[in-house]
Image (tube, grey):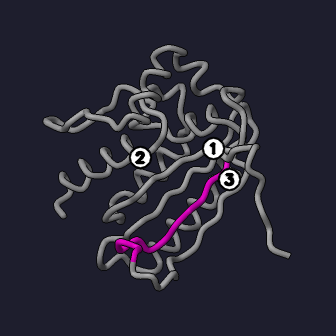
């Protein structure tokens, strides 16, 4: 996939699949059509404003941000390891008001064997205390003002993107009404 097409696909995937959305910085000629959930988030951002939308106390509850990568062919294991290490390091290096705000980051390589992985190779699951923390972390293309997004995550994306062929991003808020069931 050519770089311009890849960037277009990446921006659209993030815009549609990440729950919140704002005025998107899409490539020239790209469609701004959003799915109903993304449109609802864009409307929400317009109603409450950036300060509230990215505030740590905005919509508290466990928010999961799932990111899955397919690496470009020829991406070395050393580069993949650097991407993995930098991603995991964000749990401590990403800070708000001098304190870490990411509750956890997990990673793993695809190993299901069901043949439904669509070529995705590695996944990361990031947990936040609130939608506001997640909104702050995600940054561009959702939030376009540097005062309201995580600079460490933006630098990570600049490093990782040249090595990623495709990605899927999926967010959800864990419902308190549905407890986690564990098997003894």
Rendered location of residue 137, percent (x, y): 56, 40
State the residue at coordinates (31%, 79%). Answer: 74
* Labels 1, 3: front one: 1
In the rendered view, would you say 59 is above or below 8? above
> For the residues carrying marks 2 and 3, which lies nearer the camera in this image?
2
Disc on the earlier residue, 1 or 3: 3
> Where does label 2 land, which residue?
17
Is 126 included in the stretch rendered in magenta? yes
Residue 118's x, y, as percent? Answer: 35, 71
Secondary structure of the residue carrying tag 2 is helix
Position of 160 with respect to 62 (left or right) is left
Q: Is residue 54 magenta?
A: no
Q: Specify the label residue 91 is tagged with.
A: 3
Question: Disc 1 marks which residue?
Answer: 173
* Mark before the other along the chain sequence, 1 or 2: 2
Question: In the rendered image, which quarter is residue 119 located in?
Answer: bottom left
Say which residue appears at 35% left-offset and 26% top-offset: 23
Q: Upstream in the sequence, badge 2 or badge 3? A: 2
| Residue 110, placed above or below residue 11 | below
* Viewer-closest of 75 and 15: 15
49 displayed left or right of 62: left
Q: Give the CA separation, mark 1 to mark 2.
A: 14 Å
Q: Residues within 10 Å of mark 1 (few under 14, many from 20)?
A: some
Which corner quadrant of the image does residue 21 belong to? top left
Quadrant for residue 84, please give it.
bottom right
Magenta extent: 116-127
Circle 2 packing at 10 Å, graded few (<14), some (14-19), many (20+), is: some
Q: Give the residue displayed 43% in from the left and 21% down from the top.
A: 43
């Amino acid at each position: 996939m050519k770089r311009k097409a890849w960037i277009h696909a990446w921006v659209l995937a993030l815009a549609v699949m990440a729950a919140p959305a704002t005025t998107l910085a899409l490539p020239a000629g790209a469609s701004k059509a959003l799915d109903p959930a993304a449109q609802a988030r864009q409307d929400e951002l317009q109603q409450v404003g950036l300060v509230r939308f990215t505030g740590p106390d905005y919509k508290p509850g466990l928010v999961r941000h799932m990111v899955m990568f397919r690496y470009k062919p020829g991406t070395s294991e050393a580069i993949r390891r650097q991407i993995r290490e930098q991603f995991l390091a964000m749990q401590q290096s990403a800070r708000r008001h001098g304190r870490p705000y990411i509750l956890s980051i997990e990673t793993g390589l695809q190993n299901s064997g069901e043949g439904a992985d669509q070529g995705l190779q590695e996944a990361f699951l990031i947990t936040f205390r609130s939608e506001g923390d997640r909104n702050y972390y995600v940054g561009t293309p959702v939030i376009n003002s540097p005062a309201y997004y995580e600079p460490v995550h933006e630098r990570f994306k600049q490093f990782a993107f040249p090595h990623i062929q495709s990605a899927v991003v999926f967010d959800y808020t864990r419902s308190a009404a549905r407890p986690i069931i564990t098997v003894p």
